[in-house]
Structures are given as C-alpha cells and as structure tokens.
Amino acid sequence: MDLRRELAVAERLGREAAAIIAAYFGTGIKVDYKPGEGPVTQADREADALIVGGLRAAFPGDGILSEEAPDDGSRRTHERVWMVDPLDGTSDFVRERAGFAVMIGLAIAGRPVVGVVLQPTTGVLYRAVRGEGAEQVDGAGGVTRLQVSTVDELAAIRLVASKSHRGPSIDRVRAALGVTDEMNIGSVGLKLGLIARGERDLYVNPESHASLWDTLAPEVILDEAGGRMSDLAGAPIDYLGPSLKHARGLCASNGRLHDRVLSSLAPLFPPRA
C-alpha cells in the first residue's frame, strides 16, 4: 500500500498549523474552557480549521475525527479515518512551556498507518508510515531513523509522564516498578516521540483522560521505531469503537519491557470494562 501522498499531505498541513501556533505562542492568548474538558484557544481553532480543511480537500472520501469538533459518529462508516489533535498539550502552550505538538494520523480499518507529530517550538517532526520505519526530522531538515532503546530491566526504566496532569497514580507506578528516573512533558505525542528515539523507555497513563486523537499518530511512529502501545490489560488500542476515551488506560514502551510492566502493574489497576 503506497501512502507516500498521505504522509506528504499530513506533513505539509502539520508544518502550516505549527506556524500558526508558533505565532501565538507567548502572546498572552485568551484561554477558553470546553465544558467538561480542558483549555482551548484561538490557536487550537485556527490550526484545526487549516488541517481539517486541507484533509477534506485532499481526501474527500475519508472520515475525519478532530478534538475540536463534535464526534457525529460518521467516522465509523469510513474505512479510512484521519484523527487530528491540532494542539496536543494546550495546557503547556498557555503556560508558555514547550511541551505541545501538532498531531495528524490516519487509520485504515482501525489500524494506524500514517503518523505525523510536530513540535512547533523546535521544528522537530516525527513521521512514520506502516511498514516503512519511523524518522525524526530536525529543525534544520536533518533526518534520523528512529529506534527505541534496549533497556530491559525494570529498575533502569526512564519514565516519561505528564507535566500538567500528573496524578498520584504515577507514584504508584514508580513504586511498583522501582523507577527512579522520571521526565515530565505535556503532549502524548512528544512523550512517545522520546520513547521512539530511545531517550525514554516507558509511558503509563492509568487514567481515562486521553482520547483517540492523542494516540493514533504517535502510535504508528512508536511501532515503526520498534516499540509497543496497548491498554493496561495488554490489548491493542481500539480505534473502531464508539468511545473516544482510552478508558482502560495506556502503556507505551520500548517493547522489551512491555509484558513485564503490565504484569507488575496488574494488581494496582484491575481491568476495566
């Protein structure tokens, strides 16, 4: 399956959206709050309009799910579905921290096949197509093949966790695994990017706050770099179901550690329906 055009369009739209967001960064932009959700800004809305409009123009027959639009269920009638988070890590963005990203991913029959994650403040871009490996493109255009770490001892794990939404459950994770090394950053996409490039080894989110658009793009990047993502029961992430939330938690790793991490954490976080 040739998905080079899909990747090229996603990368172009990601860079254009990142330019919009970067222009707002540090300007004291007004912050609104969606009912029951987190903060949203004009940067989120403008980036979303650009990405969604661009995807509709390029691929008119595809479904689209975006964080900034209500889910009308139509995505479940399409074999090909784009999932967009125009500004992942808005809390970091409004606090003028660099832990936010643009994320664009494509699933075919529920399987992530294309992913782009771009950090506007640095210009670093992660990209992958299923079966073709994953790459990092730095701000100067240099390309590096991504490969996860070889860490295989629980006590040696370098954990990456949330910056703005870190809860006490992470302390329980650390205690169960014997982890002493923790880094914190906002965007899920940037967390998984750090694992994909071998600088971190594990991300665990026992809560149900993350959504489908938070994981689709970075999941294919992590997979193609040799890593693995699942829910806390070890099951693949479900991108076809009606729920937008990852109610059974998330675990992303370098792959070598995955099963032992899940086994160690099972008593702490019993399976949920």
Image (cartoon, grey):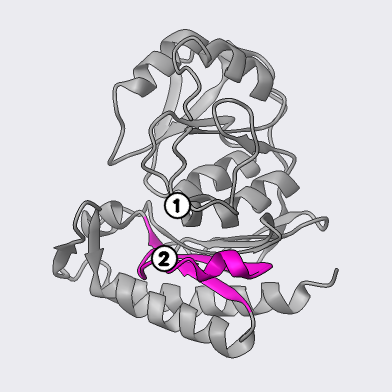
Residue that sits furthest to the right in the current view: 1
Residue that sits furthest to the bottom in the current view: 57
The answer to whether residue 139 of the structure is visible from this angle is no
Instruction: Please name the residue that numbered disc 1 is placed on.
Output: 244
Depicted 196 relative to depicted 17: above or below: above
> Between residues 7 and 232, which one lies in front from this camera angle?
232
Query: Which residue corresponds to the image point at 59% horizontal and 18% vertical from the top-left?
Result: 261
Left or right: residue 187 versus residue 255 is: left
Residue 57 image-quadrant placement: bottom right
Depicted 260 relative to depicted 142: above or below: above
Residue 147 image-quadrant placement: top right
Q: Mark 2 and mark 1 in contact? Answer it, CB < 8 Å.
A: yes
> Quadrant location of the N terminus?
bottom right
Judged from the image, the secondary structure of the residue bearing numbered disc 1 is loop
> Between residues 251 and 183, which one lies in front from this camera angle?
251
Answer few, some or many: residues within 10 Å of disc 2's Cα (few below 14, many 20 plus, some between 14 and 19): some
Judged from the image, the secondary structure of the residue bearing numbered disc 2 is loop
The answer to whether residue 146 of the structure is visible from this angle is yes
In the rendering, at what x and y percent does residue 29 appear?
Answer: 17, 70
Q: Which mark is residue 71?
A: 2
In the rendering, at what x and y percent does residue 137 appear?
Answer: 63, 63
Q: What amino acid is at disc 2?
A: Asp
| The magenta stretch spans residue 84 | yes
What residue span does the magenta drawing correspond to? 62-88
Left or right: residue 15 versus residue 184 is: right
Q: What amino acid is at disc 1?
A: Leu
Query: Which residue corresponds to the image point at 18% horizontal and 71% vertical from the top-left?
Result: 27
In the rendering, at what x and y percent does residue 146 appear?
Answer: 71, 48
